[in-house]
Image: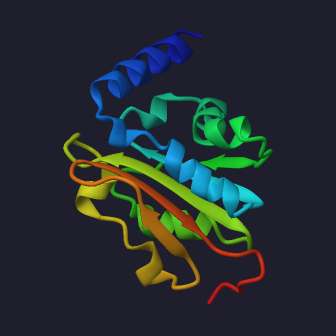
Amino acid sequence: TIYLGLGGWMLAGRLRMAPKRYNFEAASSLLAAKAPSRLVFLWDHPVDPILAPDQLSALGGFFLQRAGRDVPVAPVVLAPGEDPNTRLLHDAGPPGSAILWIYDTVTKGTAATRRPPRIPTLDPSFTCRPFASGRFGVLACWRPADTPKP
């Protein structure tokens, strides 16, 4: 419970300091409209590993749940040095999966600083839309349920 409290406090403080463009509600609304069968969620931040998987699932699926979409969320915790692009694509293998990737490129230890988003380059069956710019990034990607994986 101490990790839950600490993680919540850190997240709340972080979001209060972040500009409104760091909000991932618009990205979640787009994904909700695409009706994914599953969401793969990465909060690309060094504090990510201290949060429990159910906390990350709740965070990633918050706006989908609020929109009335009951979508299972698969949280991703990267290993040090792991490429987030290949990991997210691997975890989003099943048809109908969507990806939500949130990152801050100024924070030391963020994977997006070493390996920026390039999901549709690696897998053209995905369509992605960025929802932020500059240091804060929110990337929403989807692949229709009937689109085969290349």
Q: How many marks?
A: 0
Q: Position of residue 64 (x, y in %)?
A: 68, 44
Left or right relative to 100: residue 81: left
In this rendering, the answer to whether 18 lies above or below 88 is above
Left or right relative to 27: residue 70: right
Q: Position of residue 66 (x, y in %)?
A: 70, 35
Query: Which residue corresponds to the image point at 34% horizontal and 43% vertical from the top-left?
Result: 21
Q: Position of residue 3 (x, y in %)?
A: 51, 16
Query: Which residue corresponds to the image point at 59% horizontal and 10% vertical from the top-left?
Result: 1
Does any portion of residue 133 appear in the rendered image? Answer: yes
The image quarter in which residue 91 lies: bottom right
In this rendering, the answer to whether 48 lies above or below 139 is above
In this rendering, the answer to whether 111 lies above or below 11 is below
Frontmost residue, 126 versus 28: 28
Frontmost residue, 24 versus 40: 24
Q: Position of residue 83 (x, y in %)?
A: 39, 64
- The image quadrant where one finds the C terminus is bottom right
Frontmost residue, 111 versus 129: 129
Query: Which residue corresponds to the image point at 71% horizontal and 86% vertical from the top-left?
Result: 148
Does any portion of residue 45 appear in the rendered image? Answer: no
